[in-house]
Image (cartoon, grey):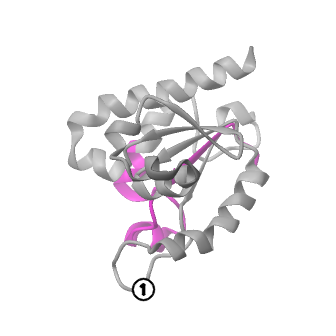
């Protein structure tokens, strides 16, 4: 599926693992509402253009057997799969949601990848030549609803990047 937006999230949680899809459950509902507010669909029906679709995926393709954060070598092991997904989807912009997505995509920027998300927001980075915007993961936003406005600003920044690329 070709889509202008690629949304990259954290490793799958229990709900995503059961559903076999990124951003399932309440986090998916929140993200779906945010995308719909911008005229996007996470489903990507055949009648939609790439500009109307958002492709959602996780930074790693499976959950570690024991509930823990993925190790750097696990992130690196899944990176070829993500690179292939990106090549197939051909996004015009990537929305990195959460610290693991940021670590993977901004790893080539050195120590910057380890900065808190709040310090990385509001700037457009690049991954394989594709603009990357950093924001909070919906699971975080459900715990910290006051930061939803900041995440909305980030989604609007993605929309601005796309608008500039069309000119």
Task: Answer left or right for 26 relative to 105.
Answer: left
Using the image, determine if residue 97 lies above or below residue 35: below
Please check the rendered image and state whether residue 59 is part of the magenta-colored stretch, yes or no: no
Q: Position of residue 18 (x, y in %)?
A: 46, 74
Q: Position of residue 146 (x, y in %)?
A: 21, 34
Q: Residue at x 66, y 32 (%)?
A: 52
Identify the image quadrant of the C terminus.
Answer: top right
Q: Position of residue 23 (x, y in %)?
A: 46, 56
Q: Nearer the viewer, residue 134 or 31?
A: 134
Q: Residue at x 69, y 31 (%)?
A: 51
Q: What is the crowding at mark 1: few (fewer than 14 residues within 10 Å), some, or many (at least 20)?
A: few
Task: Answer left or right for 76 relative to 9.
Answer: right
Residue at far front of view: 110
State the SS at label 1. Answer: loop
Q: Is residue 113 visible?
A: yes
Please check the rendered image and state whether residue 9 is part of the magenta-colored stretch, yes or no: yes
Task: Answer left or right for 83 relative to 65.
Answer: right
Q: Residue at x 66, y 18 (%)?
A: 164
Residue at far top of view: 167
Q: Position of residue 154 (x, y in %)?
A: 44, 30
Name which quarter of the figure residue 31 lies in.
top left
Q: Which residue is mark 1?
A: 65
Q: Nearer the viewer, residue 121 or 19?
A: 121
Read off the magenta span. 1-30
Q: How many marks?
A: 1
Task: Answer left or right for 108 relative to 129.
Answer: left
């Amino acid at each position: 599926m070709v889509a202008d937006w690629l949304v990259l999230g954290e490793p799958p949680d229990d709900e995503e693992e059961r559903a076999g899809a990124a951003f399932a459950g309440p986090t998916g509902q929140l993200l779906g509402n945010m995308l719909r507010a911008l005229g996007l669909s996470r489903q990507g029906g055949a009648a939609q253009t790439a500009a109307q679709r958002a492709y959602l995926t996780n930074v790693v393709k499976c959950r570690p057997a024991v509930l823990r954060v993925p190790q750097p070598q696990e992130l690196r092991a899944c990176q070829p799969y993500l690179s292939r997904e990106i090549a197939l989807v051909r996004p015009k912009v990537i929305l990195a949601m959460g610290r693991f997505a940021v670590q993977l995509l901004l790893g080539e920027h050195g120590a910057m990848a380890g900065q808190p998300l709040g310090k990385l927001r509001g700037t457009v980075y690049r991954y394989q030549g594709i603009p990357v915007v950093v924001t909070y993961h919906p699971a975080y936003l459900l715990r910290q609803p006051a930061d939803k406005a900041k995440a909305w600003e980030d989604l609007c920044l993605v929309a601005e990047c796309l608008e500039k690329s069309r000119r």
